[in-house]
Structure formats: C-alpha cells, structure tokens
Image (spheres, rainbow, N blue to C red):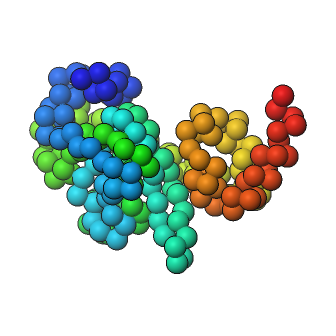
Amino acid sequence: MERIQAIIDRYKTASADDWQQWFNISTIRQFEKGQVLIKEGEIARVCAFVLKGTFKNTTQCQEDEEKILGFGFETDFLASCESYNCQQPSAFAIVAMEPSLLMVTDNDRLVELCYKNQQVANAGFLLTIQLMQEHEEHLKILSLNSPLLRYEYMLKNHPELLQKVSLTDLAKYLYVSREALSRARKQIAPFSN
C-alpha cells in the first residue's frame, strides 16, 4: 500500500522488513469525524500511524472548553506514551477531525515485538522522542505572551499548519480566543504582501 510505503520512506529508522513486522501486528481502521482513538482519562492501549486524514490531541480544561495539544496528519505517529508506560489515565484524547484511516497497533504486542527486534525498538524510541519534541515546541509557543507572537511563530515555523486546520482549531492550539487570533492575523496581513 502506497500510504504504508510513505511511512517507511519518512521514518528511515528501520529496514522495510523490520517495518513489515510492525505492520503485521497492526490493523487498518477507518475513523469517522469525532471518533476517538484514545480516550482522555483511560489508559492508552494502542498507538497508530495516520494513513489518511487528520487527528487532534485534545483535553477538556473547564466545562466544554477544549484545548488542542497537537495535530496528526498523514504518516504522523499518534500515541499517549506516558499513559501506557506508566499505566496511568491518558491526559488527553486523540480524536479524528475528519473521516480518516489509521494503522493501529496494540501497545502490548508492539512491546513484545520490540523485545525481539532491536530495529523496531529503535524506531519506537525515535517516534517517542519526536512526540516529546513536538510537546516541548508547543510549550515554547504557549510561553510567548501574546496572540500576535504566537501567530507569528506559527507563520514562520509551521505555515503548512495554517492551511490544514481551521482558525477555531488553531486558536484552541495557541490557547487564545478565536477573536484574538483574528486580530493578530489582521495585524500581520498588511505586511505579508
């Protein structure tokens, strides 16, 4: 499958044969918009690669106030590593933003494979590091003290994200109101031509 080959091409941390062992213990699953891969408050039992579609890591901070911690696009790895590793409830949910296709792996089966195959273990380790780096970058963005600075950071470092997600979801990711983000965009717009 072409989409699985895209994962192999993106993550050159193991041979095609090693990746095939991972894929062999996985299943392809379709997700509808709003369907949950990992529920907030439950121990994460699976991880996944996005074959098609978009996902978001979300948490509910207050009554009906969603915060987005990250996004997952084609070939991205989705997991709540801390939840599984510590056997504690996940601090966030992973939710489909549109009809999507995932390659889902049971975490226990993946750990068994990692004990048998060092290259798969190395790939898993590097994927976990990547998730940690994305989380750290999100914290860096949130440390910027205005919606304008946060939006400027996104323009400079992740312009593709601005094309892939709605203004509402971007505001939830930047922890600002949609209105504040709109004002920041308008402040920058005259200078972007």
Image x and y of residue 17, in percent: 17, 23
The quadrant of the image that shows the C terminus is top right
At a point 23% along the width and 58% down the height, the residue shown is 45
Image mark count: 0
User: Relative to residue 67, is residue 160 depicted above or below?
Assistant: above
Find the residue positioned furthest to the bottom. 63
Position of residue 165 in the picture relative to residue 153 (left or right): left
Nearer-the-camera pick, 78 or 187: 187
Question: Residue sitting at 79 percent across and 50 percent down?
Answer: 184
Specify the quadrant of the image occupied by residue 171: bottom right
- The correct choice, above or below, for 11 with respect to 124 in the image is above
- The residue depicted at 44 percent of the width and 38 percent of the height is 73
Q: Position of residue 148 (x, y in %)?
A: 78, 51
Report which quarter residue 1 is drawn in.
top left
Q: Nearer the viewer, residue 32 or 127?
A: 32
Q: Is residue 44 visible?
A: yes
Tell which of 7 and 65 is nearer to you: 65
Left or right of 190? Residue 110 is: left
The x and y percentages for residue 151 are 72, 47
Residue in view at x 24 percent, y 52 percent: 46
Apparent side of residue 142 relative to residue 87 in the rendered image (left or right): right
Residue 131 visible in the snapshot? no
Figure quadrant of residue 163 = top right
Q: How far across and down, in percent of the image, does residue 175 sit?
A: 64, 61
